[in-house]
Structures are given as structure tokens and as C-alpha cells.
Image (cartoon, rainbow, N blue to C red):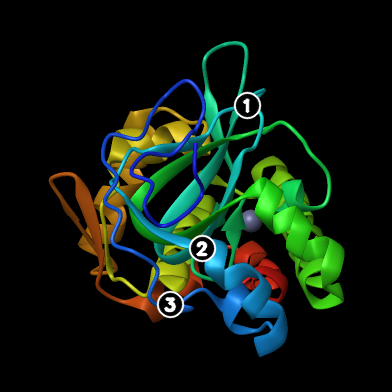
Amino acid sequence: MSDTVSQTRLPVGPKAPPAIVEVGFAGIGGNRLLAALPAADFALLAPHLAEASFKHGSVLQEPGQPVTHVYFLESGLVTLLALLPEGHAVDTGSIGREGAIGLTAGLSAQKAVTRAVVHVPVSAAQISVARLAEAASRSKPVRNMIVRYTDGLLEQTLRLAACNAVHDVSQRLCRWLLQAHHRTGDHTLPVTQECLAGMLGVQRTTVTAIGRTLQTEGVIKVRRGRIQILDVGALECRACTCDRYGRSSTT
Ligand SMILES: [Zn+2]
């Protein structure tokens, strides 16, 4: 399979994304990692980048599957889920335009450890791992980009583990909404209460009760299949600060 702009489908493990629209790569787009590269180093990647779009629910990587492509997000939101033997899929981190999916594979071939699911429709610049590795072998800034981002993602995951152990569900729910808002820039998030409950590892009734309280207080508005943030400041007051710490390195 080619990794040029002419390709029309992506290898993403056992579950193919429901819809992909290739529109051709026209520039850096909104990805902050690519935008921060010196021009000469970005030029090593540019010929091999292709534009891709993914709908809500698309799966970009599955645990245990080889990482074949890296996706530099330009818009939207992807959540990294840890799959537990009991069938739970719990949130271990979120990635927006500040980051990329599968980036570490550019330094060493590896298999995915999480399921990467699109929560807010994504536009991304994609590149094959082989092409990224080739550029990394020739460019210190590209290698540094991979190392720094991988470190930041690890920090985010560790903080989230501590958050899940210590902070209550309401704080974590508010934190997730804020995190999604900061990464996408959107006030309306296409996320269901059932989906939120799964990611937070709690019962749906718990999320429903918290959502009702937040709605009564004028912080959010719960709609069918989406949540609208009405008051970001009020949401920040109710959220734990775990995302705020992580934001310095990953957003
Ligand atoms: Zn927390």
C-alpha cells in the first residue's frame, strides 16, 4: 500500500474506520508539532504527508496491532482507551491538534498499547511509520519532537492514573469536558453520557446525575448525543486540576 496522497484507505488494525475522505495534503494545517518544526526538517516529512478525515467512532489503532501510520491531528479529538479483561474501555489520555497518534513508532517499531477512538471528527496529516523513521534518522528536530511528545504523553497518562485513583467522578467528568474543549476549541462536544460513563469507569446513572446537577447550575446543557459547555469558568471551578498540569507538555 502506498503512503502517498493518492491512497484512499488506511491500515488501522482489525477495525477499519467507518469513513475516510482523502483530500490531498495542502500544508502544515493546524497540527502544532508539525508547525513547530524548522522548515528544512518539515520538508523531509512534507512529501509523504497525506490529509485524512475520520468520523466519530473511527478506530485509529488497536492494542496489539503494529503501528503502521502516524496521524498528526489538525482538528478534532481522539481518546486513548485501555481495554480491560472485563470488557471496560477506560480513558487513559486525549489527543487533539497539539499531538499525534502512534508517534513513538517513528523511533522504534512497536505495537499499539491502547485503542485510539475518534470522539470529535478528526482532520489529520498522516504518514507511514517507515517514512517518519527515515526522516527521524536524518533530522535531530524530528527525533526531539518524537521524544518530547512521548514524554509528555507519558506524563499525561501518569497524571490521569493518579486522577482516577484520587479524584471523585464529578471532578473527573468536568476535567474530561474541559480537556476536550481545550483540545478542540469547541463548546459543543459530540459525546453521550453512556460513552462518558465508560471512559470514566462508572455507571451511566452516575454520569446522568452529575450531568443533571451541572445543567441545573447552568454549567452545561445536555442534549441528545452531545454536551454543550455553557460556562467554561464554572466548569473549571468544578474540575480537578489534573488536565491543567498536563496541558503544559501536551497542549
Ligand atoms: Zn483529577
The image's mark for residue 49 is: 2
User: What amino acid does circle 3 point to?
Assistant: Gly
The answer to whether residue 159 of the structure is visible from this angle is no
Q: Residue at x 29, y 68 (%)?
A: 219
Q: Is residue 125 above or below residue 64?
A: below
Image quadrant where one finds the C terminus: bottom right
Left or right for 108, reference 169: right
Query: SS for tag 1?
Result: loop
* Disc 3: which residue: 29
Q: Earlier in the sequence, mark 3 or mark 2?
A: 3
Q: Residue at x 57, y 11 (%)?
A: 86
Residue 214, position in %: x, y?
30, 59
Q: Residue at x 59, y 64 (%)?
A: 99
Q: Is residue 116 above or below residue 229?
A: above
Residue 13, position in %: x, y?
52, 26
Q: In this orientation, which residue lies closer to the viewer: 141 or 112?
A: 141
Q: CA distance from mark 3 to mark 2?
A: 11 Å
